[in-house]
Amino acid sequence: VFVVIMMLSDAVWASAVGLLLFIVASLTDMLDGKIARKYGLVTDFGKFMDPLADKFMVIGAMFVILYRSLASPTPDKLFSNVFFWAFMIVIFRELAVTSMRMVVNNTDGIVIAAGWLGKVKTCVQILFILTAIIEPMFSYDFLGGHVASYVTMAAMAVMTLWSGIVYFKGYWKYINPSV
């Protein structure tokens, strides 16, 4: 629903509704995890699917942001180019970590739950998405009106790389037993 609303129009109303939907989705995702932990409803299926659902939510939102940036009547080429590369970091990290989790699960039966660093990474990604949706609603000229987006994008890229490296270092022994 978020993607459809955001793709319907580049008007402020679509951004506002999309923003609200994304906030609700992010908060319900957080609440779902808290409720599962509080009431002992954590399952291996949930440990695997919750981070996967987060990835779909984040990557879908980033596709919309990139599309809207490129399809704008006055596209900001610098923002689009910088965001494209940050988005590639996110996509490759998510594919790599998800693939590693599947291999480890299929070979050793170990379900790799999201660690604290992965949760922080997801929060920073969500912060970037919220910033990238909100910022264009306001008009100012400094750096094409994307100052906060650049800052949160940089934080997102760093956290995405850092958490990916930590996951690989921690679970490489299951992929390459000779290590």
Image (tube, grey):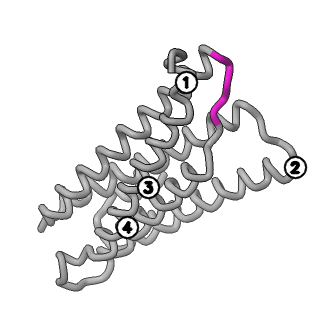
Span highlighted in magenta in the image = 108-112
* Mark 2 to mark 3 CA distance (whole Å): 30 Å
Q: Report which residue position mark 2 lands on.
A: 39
Dominant SS in magenta? loop
Which residue does the image show at 52% across and 39% down from the upper left? Answer: 167
Which residue does the image show at 32% across and 77% down from the upper left? Answer: 137
Residue 170 percent across, percent down from the top left: 55, 35
Residue 173's disc number: 1
Labels 2, 4: front one: 4
Residue 40 percent across, percent down from the top left: 86, 44
* Mark 4 to mark 3 CA distance (whole Å): 10 Å
* Mark 2 to mark 4 CA distance (whole Å): 34 Å
| CA neighbours of label 1 inside 10 A, class few (<14), some (14 to 19), many (20+) | few
Pointers 1 and 2 in contact (C-beta within 8 Å): no
Q: Report which residue position mark 3 lands on.
A: 159
Pick whichever of labels 1 and 2 is earlier in the sequence.
Answer: 2
Which residue does the image show at 46% across and 65% down from the upper left? Answer: 127
Labels 2, 3: front one: 3
Nearest to the observer: residue 87 or residue 161: 161
| CA neighbours of label 4 inside 10 A, class few (<14), some (14 to 19), many (20+) | many
* Mark 1 to mark 3 CA distance (whole Å): 23 Å
Q: Amino acid at mark 4?
A: Thr
Which residue does the image show at 87% across and 49% down from the upper left? Answer: 39
| CA neighbours of label 2 inside 10 A, class few (<14), some (14 to 19), many (20+) | few
Labels 1, 2: front one: 1
Labels 1, 3: front one: 1
Q: Report which residue position mark 4 lands on.
A: 152
